[in-house]
Image (spheres, helix red, strand yellow):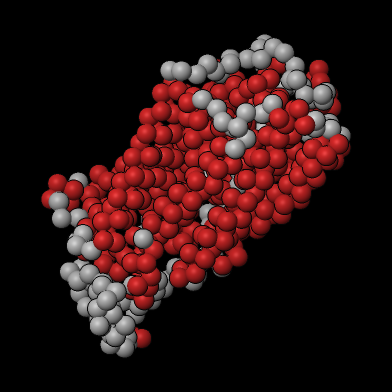
Amino acid sequence: MASEYTEKSHLYEDRSDPLNVDTQDVDPPDGNSPDVNRHEPINQDDQPVDNRQHTTTFMQTLMHLLKANIGTGLMGLPYTVHHAGLIVGPLGLLFMAVICVFCMDKLVRCAHYLCRRTQKSSLDYGEVAEEAMRASPFDALKRKARVGRFVVNLFLVLTQTGFCCVSLLYVVDGIYRIWYIYVNDSVPDIRFIVLMLLPVVLMYAYIRYLDHLAPFSTAANALSVIGLVIIFEYMFYYLINEASPKQIGNLPYATDFKGMCLFYGSAIYAFEGIGVVLPLENKMKNQDKFRKVLILGMGIVYFIYLSMGLLGYLCFGQNYWSWGFLYNVTQDLPDTLLYILVRMMFILVIFFTYGIQFYVPVNILWPSIKRRIRNERYRGNLGEYVFRTVLVLLTVALATCVLSRWYFGVIQFLISLIGSFSSTALALIFPPLLEELTLYTKGYSSPYPVARLVANMCIVAFGLMGFGAVTYVNIVGYDIPMAMTTAPATPTTNASVIDNLVSI
């Protein structure tokens, strides 16, 4: 599938260099065309001027990509592997990583191709969907092209807003646990902690540009490296000195249908970065290098995911049913000063994730709202800050509602449901469909387009089956604990936040 694009790399990679032809009507030539590498020199005065501001460098883009993917999903990966088993879990993570990165690459290449056709410098996910439908030969799809853009943007807003809410829940949970360790009986109402965080979240959400967020992403990645090194050191020590062969031997190699469904939902949630792929690519100074960023960044992400999921499951696999949905790997660390500092590090890491995830819904919603505002005073920065405030209050209100009704037992349920609903559509279903719509006019006369079509349909079918199965298990076939009244089975003094939430 990559070969067709590779043959046309000179047409796809440099979107600032338009062809001297009407790209609305003429497709890029086939790779076997004698003129594929021969076109007239470009007059530099005819090239579109790049007026983008606040662009990001290669390293800044890489930091953002890593931060967008290393978040709340990483903390629960041992529990995710637990759903699938000791052998199937790591293999399943590899399979999901390959498919997700494959679809990310499809999306980026479709954006490049459609930018060439439309003479635009960049397209976001929703615009790619609209232009792909316009490029299709089906009149019904052409007439509903704007509907396609609306649907994709709706899914993006739902997904990224859900990620923001889950990030807040993890941050509040972490603060509550540390507070409980030190003061125990004087821990305030957990919703009060949410209100305490509100001013900090607002100030962070007022950062408008990705290049201004880059220092936070870099700091978060540095904290992640330090924290992960300490956690891995503890896991290796535990495996060598404390874990018994019998304990590891009792871990199942594979699980049942319900476990695989929950594994799928949590795994697709963990690879949460497709919503930020095109915004990052569009803001990158040298966009032709974004594919290198994507492959390098996602390779690092998978290595971290595999290490965390496998080692965490080997060390603490027997504890997960005691923690249930509440599990994240820092809960199994001792309550010494070093590991409390590690928990604080990851509270900051997940908090910094909020800014990257928050950027996407703002980037989608604010331009549309801005066009409808007639008062010039509110069309500028003031209006945008008001909108950002409202959106932050919405995410905080949603998180508070979760705390008030279902408590923290809903976190893992929320992860799986978001993963099965929006993330599946954005990561696995839409990119293959958009690729086929975009390249439909190229025909299916040779074996390669047919193979591409079959592969894309298999990916779509896999996504649809996973979406249906996980949604069914989450809504119908899985019990969500309303509260826990027993202490965790781990040999630490760490108390579950739920132990004191029953009285809320």
- Between residue 305 and residue 147, name the one nearer to us: 305
Against 171, residue 361 (above or below) is below
* Residue 328 placement, left or right of 88: right
- Between residue 57 and residue 327, name the one nearer to us: 327
Residue 143: x %, y % from top left: 16, 48
**Quarter containing the C terminus:** top right
Q: How many marks?
A: 0
Against 87, residue 448 (above or below) is below
**Quarter containing the N terminus:** bottom left
Residue at 29 percent across and 61 percent down: it is 448
Residue at 86 percent across and 36 percent down: it is 241
From this viewpoint, is residue 402 visible?
A: yes
- Between residue 64 and residue 51, name the one nearer to us: 64
Kindly indicate the quadrant of the structure image that contains residue 50: bottom left
Kindly indicate the quadrant of the structure image that contains residue 118: bottom left
The residue positioned farthest toward the left in the image shown: 139
* Residue 193 placement, left or right of 447: right
- Between residue 464 and residue 227, name the one nearer to us: 464
Residue at 80 percent across and 32 percent down: it is 243
Residue at 35 percent across and 36 percent down: it is 464
* Residue 288 placement, left or right of 229: left
Residue 7: x %, y % from top left: 35, 72
Residue 114: x %, y % from top left: 30, 63
Kindly indicate the quadrant of the structure image that contains residue 109: bottom left
Against 95, residue 6 (above or below) is below
From this viewpoint, is residue 272 visible?
A: no
Residue 59: x %, y % from top left: 60, 65
